[in-house]
């Protein structure tokens, strides 16, 4: 383990038991086995892949053969679905649990924000909890006094500093906890989803602070917010059912794999019912697909969208083709050359109230990834006649796989100074 590596996990595995009674029994058996000098225990230096054959009744592998290193100045994004094993791994790293296989090595002082307000005493004031947390991290009273004002100002709790913590909101507790760890600068910082509680302004401030402290520590960051991953992380570890399915420094590729695990978005139809999407056709010069299907398209390729709509009693209204990314954020809205969209249009329907509307994107500018399209039909007073979400899906392939939603070519110039 080199000097700049602060976190090292080698072939780490952990098993749990679904039954509480059996878990207690197995725990007692393991304690007895642990103090038996003649009992054999797995050795990481002579490692073998964990097998289901060695599981006792009711047991399962919560983590299976996890290995990684995090150096000073690096941030590892630990991502995966709920139940993938992220929190279990953090508890192993923090020493709350012991691995059944493998070895974990940590260097320096460790700060862990694993549970919201963990380590805080609800009866004590914010001021007293700052000193308590600092003492748990191994900092002296003088070191705390030197940073105390910065901690309070960053957490934005000046008016509540001498109020019992039990009267704080969840966001205030989060701000205080993060501020203590960030300003006392431990060598290793473990963060589990706590930034999702604070408001937008504090989340941005916290991410900026993480960028500042990375030069002095190693960070493991657990979150389901992929924009935060792009902003803070230098490498990705993606877990699925306790196993690593992606491990590397290609952050966009890891995030894309994370979204692929969720599959296709569910189709929903809402509105007054006075309009109905009958059919959707999406077409490139080489391929086409229908409603609720996925079209593969290259970046900068032409895309033509044709939608058949049934209208009940309406001849004028608004039509919108809106594209969403996997985090359900709108990333593209089709508009005309004046930027007005399909507003105030007269629907030229046939005798049965049906109309066909087509729109063409000359060059697809979305980045790599999956995007769903909603077809939204509104009356002129903005009453939603029909909103058909996930009417179709496109899978964009691009050479650049950054975290941006769109890619635009530019004219680059370089001159010597």
Image: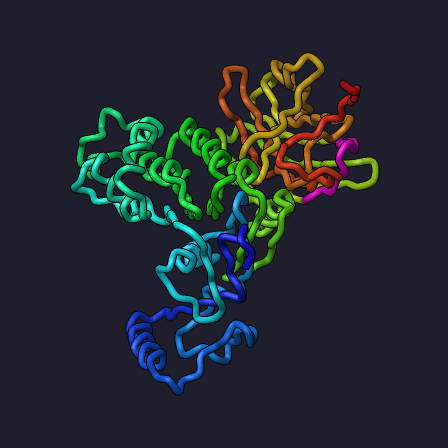
Counting from the top left corner in percent of width and height, residue 146 is at 31, 32
Rendered image quadrant of residue 142: top left
Residue drawn 28% across and 33% down? 145
* Residue extending farthest right: 286
Q: Is residue 300 above or below residue 131?
A: above
Task: Choose between 124 and 84: the one closer to the eye.
Answer: 124
Q: Quadrant of the N terminus?
A: bottom right
Q: Is residue 235 magenta?
A: no
Residue drawn 30% across and 70% down? 20
Residue drawn 57% across and 30% down? 330
* Residue extending farthest front: 142
Q: Quadrant of the C terminus?
A: top right
Task: Choose between 252 and 306: the one closer to the eye.
Answer: 252
Please count the marks in the image: 0
Q: Is residue 198 above or below residue 248?
A: above
Drawn side of residue 343 relative to residue 305, left or right: left
Rendered image quadrant of residue 338: top right
Q: Main secondary structure of the magenta part?
A: strand
Counting from the top left corner in percent of width and height, residue 81 is at 49, 52
In the image, the segment drawn in magenta is: 294-304
* Residue 268 shows up from this direction: no
Rendered image quadrant of residue 160: top left
* Residue extending farthest bottom: 38
Counting from the top left corner in percent of width and height, residue 382 is at 51, 19
* Residue 9 shows up from this direction: yes
Residue drawn 43% across and 57% down? 93
Drawn side of residue 291 relative to residue 226, left or right: right
Counting from the top left corner in percent of width and height, residue 159 is at 23, 24
Q: How is the image coloured?
A: rainbow
């Amino acid at each position: 383990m080199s000097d700049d590596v602060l976190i090292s996990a080698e072939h780490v595995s952990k098993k749990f038991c679904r039954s509480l009674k059996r878990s207690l029994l197995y725990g007692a058996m393991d304690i007895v086995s642990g103090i038996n000098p003649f009992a054999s225990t797995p050795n990481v230096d002579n490692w073998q892949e964990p097998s289901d054959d060695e599981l006792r009744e009711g047991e399962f592998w919560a983590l299976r053969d996890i290995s990684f290193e995090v150096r000073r100045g690096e941030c590892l994004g630990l991502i995966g679905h709920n139940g993938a094993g992220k929190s279990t791994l953090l508890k192993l790293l923090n020493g709350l649990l012991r691995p059944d296989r493998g070895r974990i090595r940590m260097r320096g002082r460790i700060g862990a924000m694993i549970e919201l307000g963990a380590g805080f005493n609800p009866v004590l004031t914010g001021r007293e909890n700052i000193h308590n947390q600092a003492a748990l991290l191994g900092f002296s009273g003088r070191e705390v006094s030197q940073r105390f004002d910065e901690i309070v100002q960053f957490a934005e709790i000046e008016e509540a500093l001498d109020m019992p913590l039990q009267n704080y909101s969840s966001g205030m507790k989060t701000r205080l906890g993060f501020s203590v760890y960030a300003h006392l600068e431990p060598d290793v910082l473990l963060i589990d989803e706590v930034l999702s509680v604070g408001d937008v302004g504090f989340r941005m401030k916290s991410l900026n602070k993480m960028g500042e402290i990375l030069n002095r520590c190693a960070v493991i960051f657990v979150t389901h917010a992929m924009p935060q991953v792009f902003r803070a992380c230098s490498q990705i570890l993606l877990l699925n059912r306790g196993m690593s399915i992606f491990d590397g420094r290609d952050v966009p590729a890891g995030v894309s794999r994370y979204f692929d695990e969720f599959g296709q978005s569910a189709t929903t139809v809402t509105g007054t019912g006075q309009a109905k999407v009958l059919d959707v056709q999406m077409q490139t010069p080489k391929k086409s697909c229908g409603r609720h299907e996925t079209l593969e398209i290259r970046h900068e390729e032409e895309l033509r969208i044709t939608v058949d709509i049934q209208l009940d009693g309406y001849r004028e209204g608004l039509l919108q083709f809106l594209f969403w990314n996997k985090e359900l954020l709108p990333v593209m809205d089709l508009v005309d050359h004046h930027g007005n969209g399909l507003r105030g249009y007269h629907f030229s329907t046939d005798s049965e109230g049906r109309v066909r509307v087509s729109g063409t994107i000359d060059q697809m500018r979305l980045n790599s990834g999956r995007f769903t399209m909603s077809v939204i039909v509104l009356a002129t007073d903005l009453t939603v006649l029909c909103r058909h979400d996930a009417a179709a899906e496109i899978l964009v392939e691009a050479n650049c796989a950054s975290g941006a939603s769109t890619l635009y070519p530019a004219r680059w110039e370089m001159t010597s100074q």
